[in-house]
Amino acid sequence: MAVIPVDRKPLSFAERTYMPQILSGMKITFKHLMAPKVTMEYPEERPAIPAGYRGVPTLVKDPNGREKCVSCQLCEFVCPPKAIRITPGEIPPDAPTRHVEKAPQAFDIDMLRCIYCGLCQEVCPEEAIFLQQQYTMTGYSREEMVNHKDRLYELGGTLPDEHYKWDKKKAAEEHGNAH
Amino acid sequence: MSDFFQLHPILLGILKGLAVILVIFPIAGVCSLAERKVSAWIQGRPGPNRAIPPWFAWVPVIGPFLQRLGVFHLMADGGKLLFKEDPIPGHVNKFYFMLAPLVGLVPAFTTVVVVPFGAYFDQAGHLIPLVLANVDVGLLAVFAVSSLGVYSLILAGWASNSKYPFLGAVRATSQLVSYELAMTLSVLPVFLWINAPGMSGSLSLARVVDFQSQAGFWGGAWFVFTMPISAFVFLVSLFAETNRQPFDMPESEADLVGGFHTEYGAFKWSLFFVNEYAHMTVGSGVFILLFLGGWNPLPWVSLATLIGWLSHLGAWAAHPLFVGVLSVVIFITKIITMLFVFMWVRWTLPRFRYDQVMKIGWQRLLPLAIANLIVYTVGIALLQK
């Protein structure tokens, strides 16, 4: 590349006193004094969260109100900071929401450990755990920062499900041709 | 106002002193809030607006308005600074360490004594300045006592027994020494001008204001118009003496961590800022008295003229109490404007480097002040011949 020498122009007397520059600077800051505020006042105003944002991990139910999680514990094993703790349990055979044998008895995510990596969502075979838009996870104690199962379902709600996997499986069970 | 309060002079003096302290101290406190608000507004954010005490929250319109304005943060800050942990480093001399912020309060509040903050007319029509001690050495006393404020910074820097505070203290001292010269030289033309030969000489600040409130074009012109260079040098020196940006050398956080108050916390730390704001208040008061016409409302409109206009509305306008209060209000309004300018400049200019500060002081302002002095001395000598 060619080197282009740029001459630095000598400053004029007015520039060397700095006063015109200082005064024009003060004019600018005075305009800012009157200008509307640019900040968002956080707790009252919230930013719009883009789709696909990876916030707090949550558990979701299928559109029939059943737990999707089958407590396979893959997320627990894959979780790098070991934030997830699952206690598997059985679903009684006569339960109205029964679709599989197992569901989590307890599902705790310690948000003090969670690093929002999203591996749990990646690994979940049932699409039961999602990192959703909740980005303000606060609490006054360590206990408050552990999300239990109820809270996880409350945060997660229901996501649209295209597969209805368990409906198909149940129908296949009832009409033979299970697999 | 001894005409209205027939009290023992000592009691009267104490009352007047308390009244002045009760005005200056809150101004210094409110300044810390104003600084936060002004800086926020300039930076395009709303500033402190959260704190609200319980009962005020129930007042419909005024409560939220005052909360938005952040006035309760003053109390919240005070409470926080009083009750937070105030550690004293183990390696310091505790006595001097504790003494330093207190030493700063003394000059900050002593200078107020000789600053006239208003005036009224007695029955004979003479102007009586409202001042705690109307002494002839007025300005000299301000310069002498206000520079003692740096002892507090030196003591703080030295007693902290650590390097950065000490450097901050050294810088504060050298800055004061450098700019005190230019400042003193810059006001000399004013006093050469008002002290005509043959009259009894005086350095009284009330006399300067009196001089600026005469009739006629040249009589009513404030000294900022007749002596702009003096006013400029004085203002720049004032910024340096009160350690305001862009001359914020003693505490420049960028290279000295916080300067002389690095080791201080809680209320001792805030005392340094009360001192700084008190110095700013008194300093801008002196600037207003010298160059901006003191308690005269506008250039070429003196207090007497304004009272003359107002007296058409009723006889109450000429009452000394009304005139006194009006003059004080005008003066405090000007002081508040000046304090705003201090904050406005702070959020406009970046901090100077230490060598630049020294260079501006010794190589620019001092020769300018000397040249200014010579020019005005010759001019005044020719005019008064």
Image: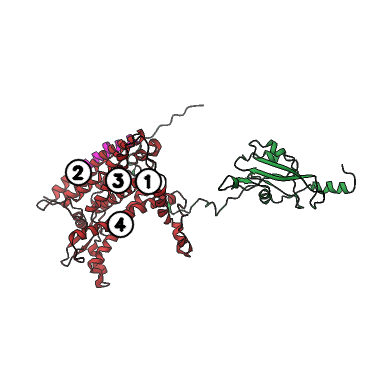
Chain colours: A green, B red
Mark 3–mark 2 CB contact (< 8 Å): no
Which badge, 1 or 4, is on the more N-terminal residue?
A: 4
Q: Nearer the viewer, mark 3 or mark 1?
A: 3
- Magenta span dominant secondary structure: helix
Q: Which residue is mark 3?
A: B102
The residue at 35%/50% (across/down) is B341
Q: Which residue is mark 2?
A: B373
Which badge, 2 or 4, is on the more N-terminal residue?
A: 4
- Mark 4 is surrounded, within 10 Å at the Cα level, by few (under 14), some (14 to 19) or many (20 or more) other residues, namely few
Name the disc covering residue A20, or none: none
Residues tagged by mark 1 and mark 2 found on one chain of the structure: yes
Residue A7 placed where, x, y %? 40, 32
Q: Amino acid at mark 2?
A: Leu
**Does residue B34 appear left or right of residue A141 in this picture?**
left
What residue span does the magenta drawing correspond to?
Answer: B353-370
Which badge, 3 or 2, is on the more N-terminal residue?
A: 3
Residues tagged by mark 3 and mark 4 found on one chain of the structure: yes
Q: Nearer the viewer, residue B49 or B155?
A: B155
Q: Nearer the viewer, mark 1 or mark 4?
A: 4
